[in-house]
Image (cartoon, rainbow, N blue to C red):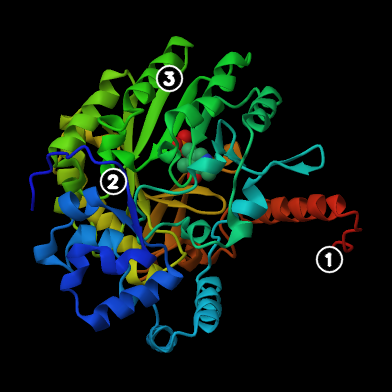
Amino acid sequence: MPDGALKSGAYRAFTARDIDAIPQLAALSADARLRLRAVAQVLPFRVNAYVLEHLIDWSRAPDDPIYQLTIPQPEMLGDADLSALVDLGRRGSEAELQARARAIQLAMNPHPAGQIDLNVPIEAGAVQRGLQHKYRQTVLFFPAQGQTCHAYCTYCFRWAQFVGLEDLKFAAREAETLVEYLKHHPEVTDVLFTGGDPLVMRTSVLRRYVEPLLRADLPHLAHIRFGTKALAYWPARFLTDPDADDLLRLFGEIQAAGKHVAVMAHYSHPRELATPAAVAALQRVRDSGAVVRCQAPLVRRVNDDPAVWADLWRAQVRLGAVPYYMFIERDTGPKEYFKVPLARALQIYQGAYRQLSGLCRSVRGPSMSATPGKILVDGVTEIEGKPYFVLRMLQGRNPEWVGRIFLAEYDPDAAWISELRPAFGAPDFFYAEELAELSRQRARVRLNMLGETPPTAA
Ligand SMILES: *Cc1c(COP(=O)(O)O)cnc(C)c1O
């Protein structure tokens, strides 16, 4: 592999249309390229020269973790679906290919955890598109121009918005929506710019969203966060892109206005921190005064190994970043391909955690971002000779739920909260009834907006 020294080239994306133009993929057989093209009809595919030249170890493909992280794999689809798509691709029946691909996408649970139904706020009879507000202190903001990434992760839980399932996309055109919302919500301390990746936006565009927040009188707004994978996938964003300096200046201006800047960095594998460009980019962000907090999901074939996480967290702390969350991969997209059972996830987490100093133990995990909240798998305990999962609510749709400990029957195969049963034969977890009531309330609000009468309560 090249040493990762950065050629200051301009950013260029390679997508499904450019598969034949990617020199590294020319080594694949024609059949393999056909299969890749077929999978890329269903799942998002986008890479760039930095990922291709400096992150993927082509001598180890297809097993290489960064190859698995960025290049869609034939096994992510069922055999029947894959061969149907390959056939249609061979025959050149574009319309049929699109239709079949769309049907497969819709069968892959494109919108998990009630993100639209439950998280998008409704105020004064209007749906606040582009916002999600699930936990009291933090509003998620999806700026329209930031809904893509420098490269796509094959496991992305927001994959649906990159394949054109339009109604699943959140896009706020106007910063005004956000400012108005925040004026009415003094409980909000954090705004999280997210996507996609908000740092794909030019700094001048980002300023159009950030500056109104600084100008508005919002004393309760204390923290501005940027969720991003740019530090891993396109470090030039912070080094040599024409507006790199201005981005770091903007981080400084936010702090001069009295707000904290948190860069929520998505690092999946220690190799993403191993190139000179990656190190220099992280250093520049830190020099701006921003704090870099790191999070990623645990994914089979990419990072399902305690040694990988130990290396990752060690590297982060050595470079001055803060390990923050380890997530369980959500129940969406090619989840069968990536899934790691909760019991195994806990072993990997603890296997890494136990090797490391307390400075690395700022991380919390493995955590599920599920419909009721962020649920931590805290351990396995034994009661009268029987094992149970100990779960803890880290974040809750209802703040009263935060910190609650609860137990589930131990199941070595369960990979999501929906696959767990409450301990001791309880019919439901503690939050179930309230969550169901919340969903009913939302359904009533939506029906009222349509001017319809809700069905009489059962
Ligand atoms: C994780 C998450 C947040 C932020 O939670 P913190 O624990 O404060 O980092 C906010 N909103 C949603 C929907 C989340 O999933």
Res 120 → quadrant = top right
Query: Which residue is located at x 43 percent, y 19 percent?
Result: 260
Query: Which residue is located at x 51 percent, y 61 percent?
Result: 160
Is disc 3 in contact with disc 1, using a CB cutoff of under 8 Å?
no
Distance between mark 1 and mark 2 Cα atoms: 51 Å
407 lies above or below 176? below
303 lies above or below 248? below
- The residue where tag 3 is placed is 260
Q: Is residue 63 left or right of residue 179?
A: left
Mark in the foreground, 1 or 2: 2
Sequence-wise, the earlier of marks 1 and 2 is 2
Residue 87 position in % (x across, y down): 40, 89
Res 432 → quadrant = bottom right
Residue toward you, 424 or 305 = 305
- The residue where tag 2 is placed is 233
Three-letter code for the amino acid on which mark 2 is drawn: Tyr
